Image (cartoon, helix red, strand yellow):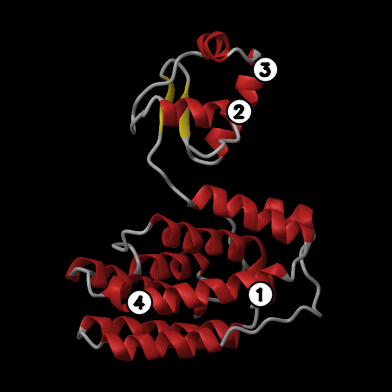
Amino acid sequence: MPDLDTDIQRYIITHQLEVGDKLPTINELSAELGVSVSKIREELAVARALGWVQIKPRTGTQVQAFDFGPAATVSVLYALGLDRGYFQDFSRLRRSVELSFWHEAVAKLTSDEIAKLRQFVACAREKLNRIPIEVPFNEHRALHLMFFVHLDNPFVQGILQAYWDAYQAFGLAIYADISYHREVWDYHEHMVECVARGDFDGGHRALQEHMNLLRYSPEQDQPSPKEIKERSAPITHFFE
């Protein structure tokens, strides 16, 4: 077995705990593992942040299903705090992932899910036509993640989730041109309609062209590390 970084990791894996299984109390873990209560508290806080466990009052600590998203997001936001140019690198990775898994993912979409995709497009159009204009970030994120909702690969899902967390914290500031957002939704609508009629190749071409629209402008004012942290919470951007 590889060397594991924390006692909590070691405990969950060596005891073969499954999703929903409860861990002993902090004091019990401290006694069994031979480490201090404060160290157990710290490790549980990390495990919770990474999505390994869920901690609820009066319920205790339960093992969660594996989700790569929290760990990926923490790493990406840390990287952006160090060097905001990393956003471009991560965007290129996300582009490759979506293009590579497109056909496998969209072939599994149901008619109800395609209807939801159309709703996202309609809602986004309505927001972009408001005065003042509202950038439809939530619809943008939901649409792209919906395309890949049936992809049974936690690492791909984690990368895509982390991308949208990074985009919310950082990317909205560098793609603020309204004409860009409107053009993006033209491509989104075309992608959805291609999938609806089973033209997955056409949707893939539209996705690729859509990705080519991304305009990275490192020279313009970018958010500070503090602003990146603050933007990790839900936000809405308006343009007067």
Q: Which residue is mark 4?
A: 102
Q: In the rendered view, does 116 fall on the left or right side of 70?
A: left
Does residue 233 appear anywhere in the picture? no
What is the spatial separation of the Cα atoms under label 3 and label 1, in whole angstroms? 39 Å
Q: Which residue is mark 1?
A: 88
Does residue 68 appear anywhere in the picture? yes
Image height of 162 relative to 37, above or below: below
Image height of 235 relative to 94, above or below: above
Horizontal and vertical percent for residue 219? 81, 80
Q: Earlier in the sequence, mark 4 or mark 3?
A: 3
What is the spatial separation of the Cα atoms under label 2 and label 3, in whole angstroms? 9 Å
Horizontal and vertical percent for residue 116? 29, 68
What is the spatial separation of the Cα atoms under label 1 and label 2, in whole angstroms? 32 Å
Q: Which mark is residue 145?
A: none
Look at 40% across and 82% down and name the residue there.
188
Q: Are marks 3 and 1 in contact (CB under 8 Å)?
A: no
In the image, what residue type sits under mark 1?
Gln
In the image, what residue type sits under mark 3?
Ser
What is the spatial separation of the Cα atoms under label 4 and label 1, in whole angstroms? 21 Å
Horizontal and vertical percent for residue 211? 51, 84
In the image, what residue type sits under mark 2?
Glu
Q: Are marks 2 and 3 in contact (CB under 8 Å)?
A: no
Q: Which residue is mark 2?
A: 43
Q: Quadrant of the C terminus?
A: bottom right
Q: Which residue is mark 3?
A: 38
Horizontal and vertical percent for residue 131? 56, 76
Residue situated in front as seen by the camera: 10 or 155: 10
Q: Secondary structure at mark 4?
A: helix
